[in-house]
Amino acid sequence: MARSNTRSKDQYEELGRLTQGLLHNINNSLAGIGGFAELLIDDLTPESPDRVFAEKILSSSEHLKLLIKEIWMLNALRRYIPETIVDVGAVLDEILMNMDVEQLAAKNIFVEYEAEDNGEALRALGNPEYIKMAVDHLIANALESFDLSPRGSKHHHPDVIKITMTSDEENIFITLEDNGIGMPENVERDCMMPLFTTKDPSKHHGLGLNIVEAIMKAMRGNFSILSQNGICTTACMMIPRKDTVKSQRQSSDHKQVF
């Protein structure tokens, strides 16, 4: 039985290496296609009908390059072991500081942030860039839900993204709630499936929520999303506190010995 499991693991790792090599070759080809498209665009006048095709080729190549980057990210997350101590509150503060709140307010979009203040920093084992990426994906989804909302129905109500950070003895919880268009039940059920999207597939890959879920799993946490169609969506990331992750790892190591 042990030999069978070992062979399966080796085969899985070999498949991963082959996939990485394939993605690398495709990415190189796309770089060449995009480069030739840029040369065509430079040579063609704005009035030329061929310029439109060249611009579409360039846009499609960039779209596929981003898709490959996200697939690479998912593959890397499966091998990621959280070891760096991260101040989760400081990461959220940085995200909020970099948001253009004035530009959002001009569109009647407002961001609210609440964090518990118990006098101690909330730390986890992970990667601050991964946490930023996860939060950025969720904020982007919220902003897109506002774009899809029928404006007349919310004429007197601003669009709001509410970000909340709380904790208990074992976990840190980051919750993002928006009052956008929400999701019907069938979309909510499938929204974290790889490559699932209800948006324009030429602009969206359908990997955003899948990446958020993968980041949380890599950090030994969890991700959930609830939505009421036409009303709101609430996404919650649960990240184990630093000591909790160490305890989980020690328990896992102990089980492996026996």
Image: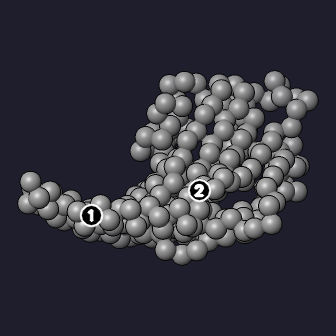
- From the top left corner, tell me how far across and down residue 99 is, in percent: 77, 61
Residue at point 59%, 56% (across, down): 170
- One can see residue 251 in this view: yes
Q: In this image, 113 relative to 211: left or right?
A: right
Viewer-nearest residue: 109 or 47: 109
What is the three-letter code of the residue carrying label 1? Gln
Residue at the farthest right position:
156
Q: In this image, 133 relative to 104: left or right?
A: left
Q: Residues within 10 Å of mark 1 (few under 14, many from 20)?
A: few
> Looking at the image, what colour scheme do you see?
one colour
Q: In which quarter of the image is the C terminus?
A: bottom left
- Under tag 1, what secondary structure? helix
Q: In this image, 33 relative to 120: left or right?
A: left
- From the top left corner, tell me how far across and down residue 50 is, in percent: 49, 54
What is the three-letter code of the residue carrying label 2? Glu
Disc 1 target residue: 256
Question: Is 139 situated above or below 25?
Answer: above
- Asked where in the image residue 169 lies, by quadrant, the reply is bottom right
